[in-house]
Image (cartoon, helix red, strand yellow):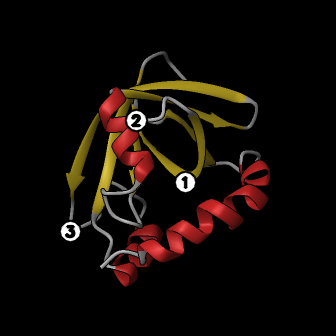
Amino acid sequence: MPLPLALGRFNVKVTNRIVGPILVRVPGFGRVVHVGHRSGRVYRTPVFLFWRGDRAVFALTYGPGTEWVRNVLAAGSCRFETRGRTFALEGPELVRDPSRRLVPRPVRWGLAVLRASDFLVMRAVEPR
């Protein structure tokens, strides 16, 4: 079972607002910029991203049912902000990978502890 959704709700309301502006300066961390599929509102969700060639891989530590994932799937695209740059991403695909081979080995161990094996994979629209 991935992290509890109650923790995710707390992070949205408290933690993300505090650490979000800091994390966009750390390599690999950034914010997914997505539009609410019902509200039309723009959201920025702090996440960790792994690159596999031109593919962006997000480990879904709260599972595939979170709002940001649903918004990205509904829109078919999003942007990723990190270290003063913005990348356009498209073609979201949910991938279940119990081996967790989409991410580096040390990250696999952490995800195994969380029992997280769902990923969102997207491709970069322009070269990064």
Comes first in the chain, label 3 or label 2: 2
Q: Nearer the viewer, mark 3 or mark 2?
A: 2
Q: Which residue is located at x 55 percent, y 53 percent? A: 47
User: Looking at the rendering, which quadrant does residue 117 occupy?
Assistant: bottom left
Residue, disc 3? 98
Q: Residue furthest front?
A: 39
Query: Is residue 8 left or right of 71 when viewed as pictured?
Result: right
Residue, disc 1? 48
Q: Nearer the viewer, mark 1 or mark 2?
A: 2
Q: Which residue is located at x 33 percent, y 71 percent? A: 116
As rendered, which of 50 and 76 lies closer to the eye?
A: 76
Q: Gap between marks 3 and 1, in whole Å?
A: 19 Å
For the C terminus, the image quarter is: top right
Q: Gap between marks 3 and 2, in whole Å?
A: 32 Å
Q: Which residue is located at x 39 percent, y 34 percent? A: 37
As rendered, which of 98 and 44 lies closer to the eye?
A: 44
As rendered, which of 49 and 44 lies closer to the eye?
A: 44
Query: Is residue 43 left or right of 56 when viewed as pictured?
Result: right
Residue, disc 2? 38
Q: Is residue 91 visible?
A: no
